[in-house]
């Protein structure tokens, strides 16, 4: 009785082909694997770039509006114009105030701003004093 040898078929196949055919076959297999892995890398890269761009658009759309708050009684909403600064807005809208720095602080606090950087088109709530 003979025992089953799983490598016998492989050795039979390799011995039946000449050496050049085997080299061509191996190279074709390597090339097809390389093509698949390059396509996979390109697909993953494009997917990541798309997700990053979409998240930037989402962030810019939410950053330009008031952070989910409505103005209270006595407060008003303004749109930031080109070249506007928080200091200029505070001086214009609170001209009778003695401490403009404190007004800038109040505007930043009311609008939950981390810095004094504002962008044109951004909406700000001006607190009542």
Image: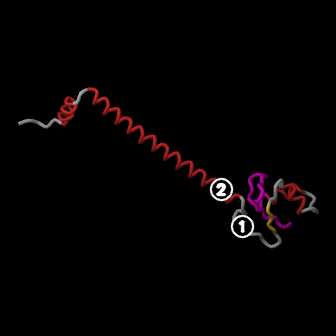
- Is residue 113 depicted above or below 16 in this figure? below
Q: Is residue 109 magenta?
A: yes
Mark 1 crowd level (few <14, some 14–19, many ≥20, 10 Å Cα): few
Residue 65 at what x, y percent from top left?
Answer: 72, 62
Residue found at the far bottom of this picture: 73
Question: Could you say whether the residue bearing mark 1 is in a helix, strand or loop?
Answer: loop
Residue 5 in picture, x, y percent from top left: 16, 35
Per the picture, the main secondary structure of the magenta-coloured stretch is loop
Disc 2 is placed on an element classified as helix
Residue situated in front as seen by the camera: 6 or 40: 40
| Residue at image location 82% in from the left, 65% down from the top | 127
Task: Return the disc, 2 or 1, that comes first in the chain's sequence.
Answer: 2
- Tag of residue 53: none
Q: Which residue is mark 1?
A: 69
Q: Quadrant of the C terminus?
A: bottom right
Q: CA distance from mark 2 to mark 1?
A: 17 Å
Q: Residue furthest top?
A: 19
Looking at the picture, how far across and down is residue 17, in whole percent? 22, 30
Which region is colored magenta?
A: 108-129
Quarter occupied by residue 104? bottom right
Left or right: residue 11 compared with residue 67: left
Magenta run includes residue 40: no
- The residue pinned by badge 2 equals 59
Image coords of residue 112 (percent x, y): 74, 59
Corner quadrant of residue 14: top left
């Amino acid at each position: 009785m003979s025992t089953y040898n799983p490598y016998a078929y492989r050795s039979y196949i390799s011995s039946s082909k000449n050496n050049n055919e085997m080299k061509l076959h191996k190279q074709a297999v390597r090339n097809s694997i390389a093509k698949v892995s390059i396509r996979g890398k390109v697909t993953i890269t494009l997917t990541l770039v798309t997700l990053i761009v979409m998240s930037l658009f989402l962030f810019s759309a939410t950053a330009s509006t008031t952070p989910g708050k409505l103005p209270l009684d006595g407060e008003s909403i303004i749109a930031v114009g080109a070249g506007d600064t928080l200091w200029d807005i505070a001086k214009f809208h609170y001209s009778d105030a003695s401490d403009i720095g404190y007004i800038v602080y109040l505007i930043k606090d009311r609008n939950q701003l981390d810095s004094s950087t504002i962008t044109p088109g951004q909406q700000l709530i001006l607190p009542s004093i």
